[in-house]
């Protein structure tokens, strides 16, 4: 039995459709995670706001700490809603982990610790502080 011939045009159209589908999926997934962060902040920390100028850096930092199951759970919650996405134990664990990542990034990367009242104004995201250096380490130039 002879295999059917596929024309070059059909192959190129199928490849283009596949690349387009992958691109739409990636963009949709990224925006779903960003929407999840925006929706979760008022629920997790009521009354706390982040400075609009530094919010994109906060969002990038929080998204950089996610992994595949969290991304899938956030995408699912944007489609079917958080209650239905967290009905399964794996979805619930992934969304709770994402919530922890959001709160940890907010607590560690903003000026929250230096304020008397965190709801007095928007928090400024300054990024994570540098790790404590080893006082006994000598720089390579001194060795």
Image: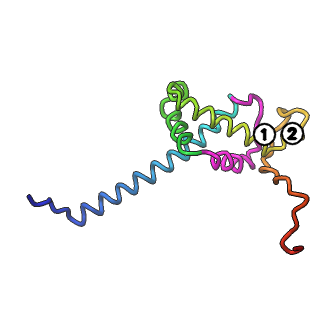
Sequence-first disc among 1 and 2: 1
Can you say whether 43 is above or below 73 in the image? Answer: above
Residue 122 picture location, percent across and down: 80, 39
Q: Quadrant of residue 142?
A: bottom right
| Residue wearing tag 2 | 113
Give SS at disc 2.
helix
Q: Nearer the viewer, residue 134 or 130?
A: 134
Residue found 70% across the figure and 31% down from its top: 42
Residue found 51% across the figure and 29% down from its top: 85
Give SS at disc 1.
helix
Question: What span is colored magenta in the figure?
Answer: 44-66
| Residue wearing tag 1 | 107
Residue 143 picture location, percent across and down: 87, 74
Residue 140 picture location, percent across and down: 83, 72
Magenta run includes residue 27: no
Q: Nearer the viewer, residue 77 or 68?
A: 68
Residue found at the very far left of the displayed protein? 1
Callout 1 touching callout 2 (CB < 8 Å): yes
Q: How is the image coloured?
A: rainbow
Q: CA distance from mark 1 to mark 2?
A: 8 Å
In the drawing, does residue 110 fall left or right of residue 60? right
Residue found 20% across the figure and 64% down from its top: 7
């Amino acid at each position: 039995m002879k295999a059917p011939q596929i024309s070059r045009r059909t192959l190129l159209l199928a490849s283009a459709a596949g690349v387009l589908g992958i691109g739409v999926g990636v963009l949709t997934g990224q925006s779903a995670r960003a929407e999840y962060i925006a929706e979760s902040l008022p629920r997790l920390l009521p009354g706390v706001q982040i400075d609009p100028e530094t919010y994109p850096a906060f969002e990038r930092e929080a998204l950089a700490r996610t992994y595949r199951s969290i991304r899938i759970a956030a995408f699912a919650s944007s489609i079917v809603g958080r209650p239905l996405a967290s009905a399964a134990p794996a979805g619930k664990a992934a969304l709770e982990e994402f919530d922890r990542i959001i709160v940890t990034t907010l607590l560690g990367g903003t000026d929250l610790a230096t304020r008397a009242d965190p709801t007095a104004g928007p928090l400024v995201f300054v990024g994570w502080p540098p790790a404590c250096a080893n006082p006994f380490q000598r720089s390579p130039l001194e060795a």
